[in-house]
Image (cartoon, rainbow, N blue to C red):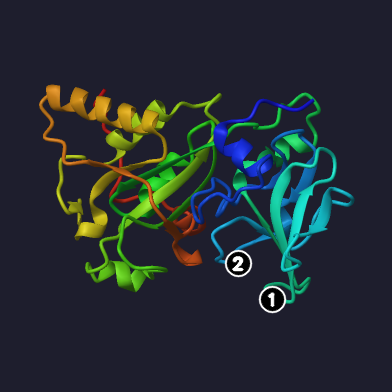
């Protein structure tokens, strides 16, 4: 049974459009499980076949057997891929680029897929797949501590740390630390809105860092450590502004900016899940009750 689609999903799946690069919720998503057709629910890709091609869309070097149909475009230049079950447009497939040993790249629109977590796909036949995920992006000082505290929240599916809000492409940690790029250290969170709301995450954000500090956070000084909410929907913008208003009425001189999300560049592997790998607790982030 086909599910109702949003305007963006119709544009991609039915009209064979393409979402803007680096805007899809699964571009840098790292959860373990499978990716299914957003329209009919048929399984398409496994997380172990996903890789980072840097192209701005989710990339896979293999599909599940019989899941994907290939059709050469009318101009003969590219090969379209679609769901073999319902015909929904997924994207295009390329060969010979050398990204992985399989030498294949399925370039897929996030809007064409839904993610099914590993625990739902294995060992729990009654678990429902996550058919709707949302992305939140917060900057509140060193991204190590923000990620550590956010990823412990039930309903959070995955997190990654990176750089956003700047002026140049593909920044490195060294570039961001120079203070000349305009980037902030940020955490991107994929979450299940049926399990945890954006407002809950935003309240946590405002309580695990000091939103009154400007151009710094605790011992970390520099514009890259600023406080900022990068909203991905207008509802997120409204919620963030509402919470800031509440805090200001309580006497907090909130400096947090609320900005439309743009390109997010994942940080180097060393920075991902830093405290989990190190086995210690954050030293510059701790929750302080403010709501």
Q: Which residue lies under the disc numbered 1?
A: 97
> SS at mark 1?
loop
Please identify the residue farthest to the right as the structure is shown: 66
Q: Measuring from the top left, give residue 241's x and y in whole percent.
A: 25, 30
- Quarter in which the N terminus is drawn: top right
Q: Measuring from the top left, give residue 185's x and y in whole percent.
A: 33, 56
**Residue displayed at 49% across by 50% down:** 23
Q: Measuring from the top left, give residue 272's x and y in whole percent.
A: 48, 58
Q: Is residue 113 visible?
A: no
Disc 2 crowd, CA 10 A, few/some/many (<14, 14-19, 20+): some
Q: Are marks 1 and 2 in contact (CB under 8 Å)?
A: yes
The residue closer to the viewer here, 70 or 267, is 70
Q: Is residue 200 visible?
A: yes
- Side of 176 relative to 31 (left or right): left
Q: Earlier in the sequence, mark 1 or mark 2?
A: 2
- Quarter in which the C terminus is drawn: top left
- Side of 159 relative to 34 (left or right): left
Disc 1 crowd, CA 10 A, few/some/many (<14, 14-19, 20+): few
Instruction: Reply above or below: 183 against 129.
Output: below
Q: Which residue lies under the disc numbered 2?
A: 53
């Amino acid at each position: 049974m086909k599910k109702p689609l949003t305007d963006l999903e119709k544009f991609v799946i039915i009209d064979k459009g393409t979402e803007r690069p680096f805007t899809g919720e699964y571009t840098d998503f790292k959860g373990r499980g499978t990716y299914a057709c957003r329209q009919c629910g048929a399984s398409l890709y496994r997380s172990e076949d996903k890789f980072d091609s840097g192209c701005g869309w989710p990339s896979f070097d293999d599909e599940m057997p019989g899941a994907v149909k290939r059709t050469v475009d009318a101009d003969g230049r590219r090969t379209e891929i679609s769901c073999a079950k319902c015909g929904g447009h997924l994207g295009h497939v390329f060969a010979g680029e050398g990204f992985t040993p399989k030498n294949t790249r399925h370039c897929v629109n996030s809007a064409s897929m839904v993610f099914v977590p590993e625990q739902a796909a294995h060992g729990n036949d009654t678990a429902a797949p996550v058919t709707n995920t949302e992305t939140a992006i917060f900057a509140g000082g060193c991204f190590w501590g923000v990620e550590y505290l956010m990823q412990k929240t039930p309903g959070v599916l995955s997190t990654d740390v990176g750089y956003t809000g700047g002026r140049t492409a593909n920044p490195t940690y060294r570039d961001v630390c120079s203070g000349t790029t305009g980037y902030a250290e940020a955490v991107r969170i994929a979450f299940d809105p049926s399990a945890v709301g954006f407002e809950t995450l935003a309240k946590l954000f405002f309580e695990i860092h000091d939103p009154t500090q400007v151009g710094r956070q605790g011992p970390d000084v520099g514009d890259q450590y600023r406080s900022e909410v990068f909203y991905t929907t207008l509802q997120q913008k409204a919620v963030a502004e509402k919470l800031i208003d509440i805090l200001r009425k309580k006497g907090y001189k909130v400096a947090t900016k609320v900005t439309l999300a743009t390109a997010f560049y994942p940080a180097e592997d060393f920075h991902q899940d830093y405290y989990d790998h190190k086995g210690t607790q954050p030293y510059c982030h701790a929750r302080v009750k403010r709501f």
